[in-house]
Image (tube, helix red, strand yellow):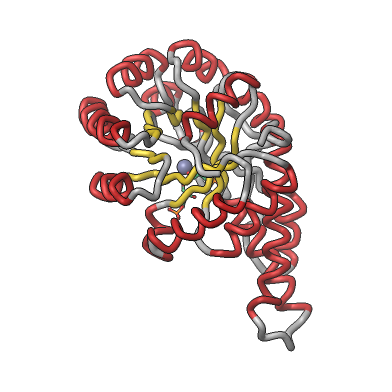
Amino acid sequence: MLTTLTSVLKHAEKHRYAVGAFNINNLETLQAIMDAAEAEHSPVILSTSEGAIDYAGMDELAALAHIAAKKTKLPVVFHLDHGKNYDLVVKAIKSGWYTSVMYDGSSLPLKENIRRTKKIVEMAHKKKISVEAELGAIAGIEDFISVEERDAHLTDPEQAREFVASTGCDALAVAVGTKHGAYKFKGESKLDYGRLKRIAEAVDVPLVLHGASGIPANIKRICTQYGCEISAAKGVSDAAVKKAVTLGVRKVNVDTDLRLAFDAGIRKFLKERPEVIDPREILKPAKELMTKVVRHKMKTLGSSGKG
Ligand code: G3H
Ligand code: 13P
Ligand code: ZN
């Protein structure tokens, strides 16, 4: 059942858990995520990035997501992830496919981010589409040379209050020390929990944690064993994600873990079964590993059984 981000996150807020937003690029990834959602009985957010739309097409990905949503009783949100291109966000709203869009104006000066986000919110709300916005630069804590530099880039709680009040956005992506991709930390996961708590107190919309892949050790081991060079990869620990959820995070974005699982499955299968040329056989273990990863994340977020 297709639904809005707002309605899914309202339930998550009431019951103090978070919903996973998983990126889709192809049929197999979509199937793996939906298999996990069914097995966990969890609500789910299917995200399409600008890159995914370039790769597979907006209509093509939307058609897959809509069919999947139609076939299940679970709440499914179809979401545009990191819409940095204003015109693409408008296109997504007008397409009639999306129940939620993210307008990402985080790289713009604050005033311009507010101005554009507000316009997107007005446009989207007329069509009952939810809007996620972003404030701050999503980068790992270790990326900043000084505390001053860190403070200038991570989300400021008072600015977040002003931003949400001025834009009317439905959810806010915050920068509290996570980072996109496989290389988030040199040592243990370090998030700025104090900042996260202050932001949650300052705003009355659900918070979103981007860059929340965990780089599971078992998946990393398979990738590495079969030739993928990612030895320095380090993700956000389950404990860190759980703590962020207790502090008010209600949407958690995961893409890299799916990429790793896909990669691990394919590399292992091709090495062990060099005689196979059927893509359906080659992609099957990749799909199964992705489902495992998504199920684990749903359990960590507390969304299992909430669908
Ligand atoms: O936040 C970024 C997601 O991992 C999507 O990545 O833009 O390469 O599709 P992408
Ligand atoms: P990861 O790179 O940690 O999977 O984050 C994905 C993300 O934030 C998508 O918006
Ligand atoms: Zn992101």
| Position in image of residue 131 (x %, y %) | 38, 33
Q: Is residue 176 left or right of residue 107?
A: right
Decide if residue 188 is in sight here.
no
**Residue 78, relative to residue 285: is it above or below?**
above
Give the camera-side residue of 159 and 59.
59
Residue 2 or residue 261, whichever sits in front: 2
Q: Quadrant of residue 220?
A: bottom right
**Residue at x 31%, y 44% (from the top left corner):** 93
Q: Position of residue 195 (x, y in %)?
A: 50, 18
Residue drawn at x 37%, y 13% is 158
Q: Is residue 278 left or right of residue 129?
A: right
Would residue 195 be seen by someone viewing this image from the given angle? yes
Q: Is residue 154 above or below residue 218?
A: above
Q: Position of residue 23 (x, y in %)?
A: 52, 51
Above or below: residue 122 compared with residue 39: above
Quarter that holds the N terminus: top right
Q: Quadrant of the C terminus?
A: top right
User: Which of the 4 image quadrants contains residue 263?
Assistant: bottom right
Is residue 153 toward the left or the right of residue 37 in the image?
Answer: left
Closest to the observer: 141 or 20? Answer: 20
In this orientation, which residue lies closer to the viewer: 86 or 175? 86
Residue at x-position 73% and y-position 43% = 40
**Residue 45: x, y in percent?**
54, 43
